[in-house]
C-alpha cells in the first residue's frame, strides 16, 4: 500500500511540474506575441514616417524646380486643377486662389489659339500624352512661349485618375532663335547689297561713256555755231553744264562705291559735307526737304579717308531724312560744323523729325539693330566704327523741341593744328 501511494504521489508531482512548465511556456509565448505586436507597430510607424518623408521630399522637389508643374483631376469634365507649384504661379501670373479648382484651359485667356487648346483637350481625352511648344499669355496680357508636356496618371486598374503637366518657359530660347534667323537674313541682305554696289559701279562706268560722247558733240556744235544762233548757243551751254554735272555725280558715286584701302589725307570737312549733299540733292528735293548749313569757315583741315567719312555723312543725312519723312511739317535739316577743342572739330546733323525713343537710345549703334521695317541695322554701327578708327566719337541725342541730332568729332590734321 505504501508503494502504491508513493507512486501515486510521484505521478501527481510530475503532473504538477508539467502543468507548471506549460504555464511558463504560455507566459513566454504571450510575451513574445506582445513583443511581435510592438515590433509590428514600430515597423508600421517607421513605414508611415518614411512615406511622409518621401511625400515631403517630392513636394519640396516640385516646389523647387523652375518649370511650372500642375495636376488636373481627370474625374471632372472641366479639367480642374488640384495642385500647382510656385513656378506655375510665377509663370502664368495667377495667384493660388485663382488657379486651384479652376478649369486649366481658362488660364490661357481670350487671346489664346483655340485650335491648339482643342488639340490638347482631344489628346488627353483619348488617354494620350501631349507635347508641344505654344504661345501663352500671362494674366496681365504679356506674351511668353512655353514647352508644354501633359501625361495621364493611372491607378492600379489602369484607369486615368489625373493629368500631370509641366510648362517650361522657352521665351529666351525662342527670341534667340528668331534673332539668329533675322541675322542670317540680314547677312544675306548685306551680300545682296554688296553685289548691287558692284552692279551700280559697273553701270556708272557704262553711263559715263555716252555722257562723254554727248559732251563732245555739244562742244563741237558750240564751236561750229560760234558767233551765230545765240539762243541755240545758250541751249548747247545748258546741255554741256548738265552733262558735266551728271559726270561729276557719277564720279562721286563711283568713288563712294569703290573698294580700296583707306587713304588718310588732309581734308576740308566743310567741302566734304557740301560734296555729299550735292550727291543727294535730287533725293532731298524729291522728298521736299531743305538742307541748311552752319559751317565754321575757319576750321582747320582734318586727317582722314575721304570715302569713309563721306559714307558716314551720307548715312547720317539719310537717317535724318527718313525720320522727317512721316511729317510734312518736318522739312529742315541742319548741318553744323564747329571747333570743339584745340585739336578736335565737331560735325552735327540735326533733323526736325520724330526723335529717338528712349528705349532705343542705348541700342542705336549695336550691330543689326534697326527700328525700320526694311532696315538692315548696319549703317550706324559701321559709321561709329569708321569715326572711332579716325580717332573720334559718334553719338546721338534728342533735341529739346523736336527731332534728334547725330554728332561726331574728328581730330585736327597734325600739320594744320
Image (cartoon, rainbow, N blue to C red):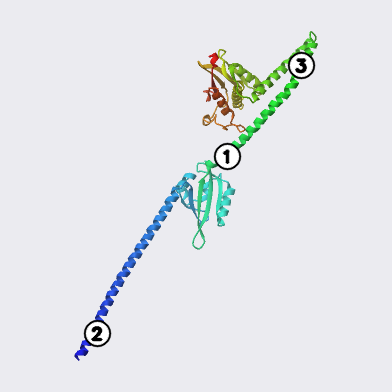
Q: Quadrant of residue 416?
A: top right
Q: Which residue is mark 2?
A: 11
Marks 2,3: beta carbons within 8 A: no
Nearest to the eye among marks 3 and 1: give it.
Answer: 3
Q: Which residue is mark 1?
A: 178
**Which circle's residue, 3 or 1, is located before the other in the chain?**
1
Left-right relation of 318 to 22:
right
Q: Residue at x 53, y 51 (%)?
A: 149
At a point 44% along the width and 48% down the height, the residue shown is 64
The outermost residue toward the bottom is 1
The reply to whether discs 2 and 1 touch (Cβ–Cβ < 8 Å) is: no
Is 348 or 403 nearer to us in this picture? 348
CA separation, marks 2 and 3? 160 Å
The picture places residue 399, in percent across and down from the top left corner, at: 53, 23
Asked if one can make out residue 125 in the rendered structure from this viewpoint, the answer is: yes
Work out whether mark 2 precedes mark 3 in sequence or the reverse, and give the earlier one.
2
From the image, state whether disc 2 or disc 1 is nearer to you: 2
Could you tell me if residue 285 is visible in this image? no
In the rendered image, the vertical position of residue 381 relative to residue 234, given as above or below: below
Q: Badge 3 is on which residue?
A: 216
Residue 131 lies left or right of residue 98; in this view the side is right
Towards the viewer: 110 or 256: 256
**Residue 68 sits above or below residue 393 on the image:** below
Q: State the SS at label 2.
A: helix
Badge 2: how crowded within 10 Å, few (<14), some, or many (20+)? Answer: few
Question: From the image, which quarter does the N terminus lie in?
Answer: bottom left
Amino acid at each position: 500500500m505504501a508503494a502504491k501511494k508513493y507512486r501515486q504521489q510521484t505521478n501527481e508531482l510530475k503532473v504538477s511540474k508539467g502543468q507548471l512548465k506549460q504555464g511558463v511556456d504560455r507566459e513566454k509565448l504571450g510575451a513574445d506575441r506582445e513583443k511581435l505586436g510592438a515590433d509590428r507597430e514600430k515597423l508600421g510607424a517607421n513605414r508611415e514616417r518614411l512615406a511622409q518623408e518621401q511625400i515631403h521630399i517630392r513636394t519640396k522637389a516640385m516646389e523647387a524646380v523652375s518649370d511650372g508643374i500642375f495636376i488636373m483631376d481627370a474625374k471632372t469634365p472641366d479639367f480642374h486643377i488640384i495642385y500647382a507649384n510656385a513656378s506655375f504661379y510665377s509663370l502664368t501670373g495667377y495667384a493660388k486662389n485663382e488657379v486651384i479648382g479652376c478649369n486649366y484651359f481658362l488660364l490661357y485667356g481670350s487671346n489664346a489659339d483655340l485650335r491648339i487648346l482643342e488639340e490638347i483637350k482631344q489628346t488627353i481625352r483619348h488617354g494620350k500624352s501631349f507635347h508641344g511648344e505654344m504661345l501663352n499669355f500671362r494674366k496681365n496680357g504679356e506674351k511668353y512661349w512655353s514647352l508644354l508636356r501633359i501625361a495621364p496618371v493611372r491607378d492600379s486598374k489602369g484607369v486615368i485618375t489625373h493629368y500631370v503637366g509641366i510648362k517650361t518657359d522657352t521665351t529666351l530660347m525662342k527670341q534667340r532663335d528668331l534673332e539668329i534667323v533675322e541675322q542670317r537674313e540680314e547677312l544675306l541682305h548685306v551680300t545682296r547689297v554688296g553685289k548691287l554696289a558692284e552692279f551700280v559701279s559697273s553701270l556708272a562706268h557704262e553711263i559715263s561713256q555716252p555722257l562723254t560722247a554727248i559732251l563732245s558733240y555739244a562742244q563741237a556744235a558750240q564751236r561750229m555755231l560760234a558767233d551765230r544762233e545765240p539762243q541755240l548757243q545758250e541751249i548747247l551751254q545748258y546741255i554741256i553744264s548738265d552733262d558735266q554735272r551728271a559726270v561729276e555725280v557719277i564720279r562721286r558715286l563711283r568713288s563712294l562705291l569703290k573698294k580700296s584701302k583707306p587713304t588718310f589725307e588732309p581734308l576740308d570737312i566743310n567741302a566734304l559735307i557740301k560734296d555729299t549733299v550735292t550727291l543727294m540733292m535730287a533725293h532731298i528735293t524729291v522728298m521736299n526737304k531743305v538742307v541748311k548749313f552752319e559751317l565754321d569757315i575757319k576750321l582747320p583741315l582734318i586727317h582722314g579717308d575721304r570715302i569713309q567719312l563721306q559714307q558716314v555723312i551720307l548715312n547720317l543725312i539719310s537717317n535724318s531724312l527718313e525720320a522727317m519723312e512721316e511729317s510734312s511739317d518736318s522739312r529742315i535739316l541742319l548741318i553744323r560744323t564747329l571747333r570743339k577743342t584745340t585739336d578736335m572739330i565737331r560735325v552735327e546733323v540735326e533733323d526736325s523729325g520724330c526723335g529717338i525713343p528712349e528705349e532705343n537710345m542705348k541700342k542705336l549703334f549695336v550691330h543689326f539693330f534697326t527700328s525700320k521695317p526694311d532696315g538692315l541695322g548696319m549703317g550706324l554701327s559701321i559709321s561709329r566704327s569708321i569715326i572711332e578708327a579716325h580717332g573720334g566719337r559718334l553719338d546721338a541725342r534728342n533735341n529739346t523741341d523736336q527731332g534728334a541730332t547725330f554728332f561726331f568729332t574728328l581730330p585736327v590734321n597734325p600739320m594744320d593744328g
